[in-house]
Amino acid sequence: MRALIQRVSEASVTVDGDVQGAIEGGLVILLGVEEADDDSDVEWLTRKIAGLRIFSDDEGKMNRSLVDVGGRALIVSQFTLHAATKKGTRPSFIRAARPEHAIPLYESFIRGMNKLTSAPAATGIFGADMKVALVNDGPVTIWIDTKDKT
């Protein structure tokens, strides 16, 4: 499971001209699920992201987590995080999970984040053509892959 996390001052996701989810102050989490992922990846990743100390404390140091600041998450499914680009110029997405495997893990991830944070996550629509708008705060952008835990 891969996540690209961006600290934002605001963000939204739109599908067919309708805003599906929006947040002010928090994290945009682009989430990619691969066939090898399971519930242990969801559990590890939700705890890791909710506890990341990437928000400023009173002294301006990145020392607070999403939980500490009461921020919200905007979670967007993104199979392209598993693009293989080693050969040629057309990415391969062979490692990305099929919807029947990915959707339950994506939904479990949302539930896991909701349990750890004070406000429910905003989301897009799995598999939809989405437009994501955000103002990256910092900028702070972090990549996490559950296959690289050590």
Image (cartoon, helix red, strand yellow):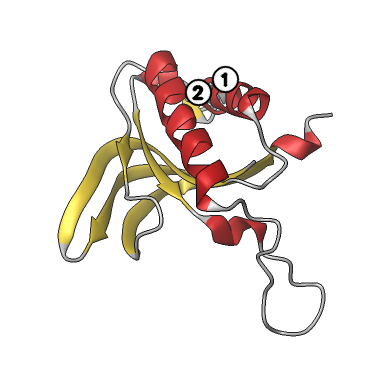
Say few, some or many: other residues with alpha carbon within 10 Å of mark 2 (under 14 / 14 to 19 / 20 or more): many
The answer to whether residue 41 is seen in the rendering is: yes
Q: Residue 98's x, y, as percent?
A: 57, 53
- Dot 1 lies on which element? helix
Residue 5 seen anywhere in this rendered image of the structure: no
Residue 9 vertical placement versus 112 (above, below): below
Residue sitting at 34 percent across and 53 percent down?
A: 135
Q: Position of residue 31 (x, y in %)?
A: 52, 45
Q: Residue at x 55, y 20 (%)?
A: 51
The residue drawn where x is 53% and y is 35% is: 105
Image side of residue 44 versus residue 140, left or right: right
Secondary structure type for disc 2: helix
Image quarter hosting the N terminus:
top right
Marks 1 and 2: CB-CB under 8 Å? yes
- Disc 2 residue type (three-letter): Ala
State the residue in front, 96 or 15. 96
Question: Residue beneath label 1, please?
Answer: 47
Q: Residue furthest bottom?
A: 89
Q: Position of residue 45 (x, y in %)?
A: 60, 28
Q: Quadrant of residue 143?
A: top right
The residue identified by callout 2 is: 50
Identity of the amino acid at label 1? Answer: Arg
